[in-house]
Image (cartoon, grey):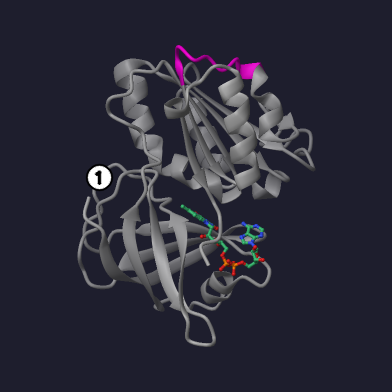
Amino acid sequence: MAIQHFPLKLVSRRMLAPTVGHYVFVRDDGAPLDFIPGQFIQVHFQYADGTATKRSYSLATIHDHALGPGEAVEIAVSYVPGGAATALFEGLEIGGVVDASGPFGRFCLMPQDTNRRYLLIGTGTGVTPYRSMLPELERLIRERGIEVVLLFGARNPTELLYGDEFRAFAAKHPANFRFVPCFSRELPEAGSPQAHANVRHGYVQQFLDEFAPDAQGDIAYLCGNPNMVDTCFEALKGFGLSVPQIRREKYVSSK
Ligand SMILES: Cc1cc2nc3c(=O)[nH]c(=O)nc-3n(C[C@H](O)[C@H](O)[C@H](O)COP(=O)(O)OP(=O)(O)OC[C@H]3O[C@@H](n4cnc5c(N)ncnc54)[C@H](O)[C@@H]3O)c2cc1C
């Protein structure tokens, strides 16, 4: 897929969590944007001293077709204290334009894979690629009967990004899709919609054993916090998964 450079105009924004915004853009040049779920874009801007810089953001758009002109290009932005891109996004008004390029990356479902199960593991905004993949996962459930376990690490229930959407997908595919929110700090209140049986208390990496990673049948995807990605990578290798079976996207700052 050819990498392009394009302006993105902000059409709406809402808070997904206290420090995470969901941004909806359209291409301001009227051209389409094709991408594969799991890919990311880069946003280009300048520091106060005029030095050029850029930051990467996974595409969160639920992808069931190539985006035509005027269709939503969605990302989730985690606000980092003192962050340069954070300031750019926080200050962006509706109608404001950012300079972007993409799509980039190979953190995608592969057509040649014949695995029985996907272990999708993400922390924070690292869950956005999996939102984009939902239509493709649904097709694989229908055509190949795959199973999917989504282990989502968040500090508390207010940070469970797109939690309603993942829960709804799990309810639609109860035999094939397990959504397992792992809260490192507070658990949901008893009786709340988030307090279901799959919820775990701790870090995602603590719960891998429970799902018995299997070198014969599993492919794993790890996305988000670099420490989580490294820890899970080593743990999954310990279960016998080979490096090509463990796909990684680390959210490191690209300054
Ligand atoms: C392939 C890829 C995809 C990415 N996708 C996303 C995405 O979908 N959503 C998203 O929000 N981010 C994503 N990131 C991270 C993003 O590109 C930025 O690094 C992040 O938003 C911080 O940028 P900033 O300019 O606000 O902070 P910076 O100016 O880069 O950093 C400010 C300070 O905060 C620290 N810092 C940077 N990032 C974090 C962090 N995550 N947590 C705590 N401290 C931090 C830095 O070390 C520095 O001290 C992705 C990164 C990569 C490489």
| Foreground residue among 160 and 236 | 236
In the picture as drawn, the residue positioned furthest to the bottom comes out as: 49
Q: Is residue 89 above or below residue 115?
A: below
Q: Is residue 154 left or right of residue 55?
A: right
- The x, y position of residue 254, in whole percent, is 51, 62
- The x, y position of residue 191, in whole percent, is 75, 33
| Foreground residue among 90 and 52 | 52
Q: Amino acid at mark 1?
A: His
| Foreground residue among 27 and 43 | 43
Q: Quadrant of residue 141?
A: top left
At a point 41% along the width and 57% down the height, the residue shown is 74
- The x, y position of residue 30, in whole percent, is 21, 69
Q: Dot 1 corresponds to which residue?
A: 65
At a point 63% along the width and 26% down the height, the residue shown is 235
SS at badge 1 = loop
| Foreground residue among 87 and 47 | 47
Please give the range of residues in magenta.
210-218
Magenta region's main secondary structure? loop
Magenta segment: does it hold 36? no
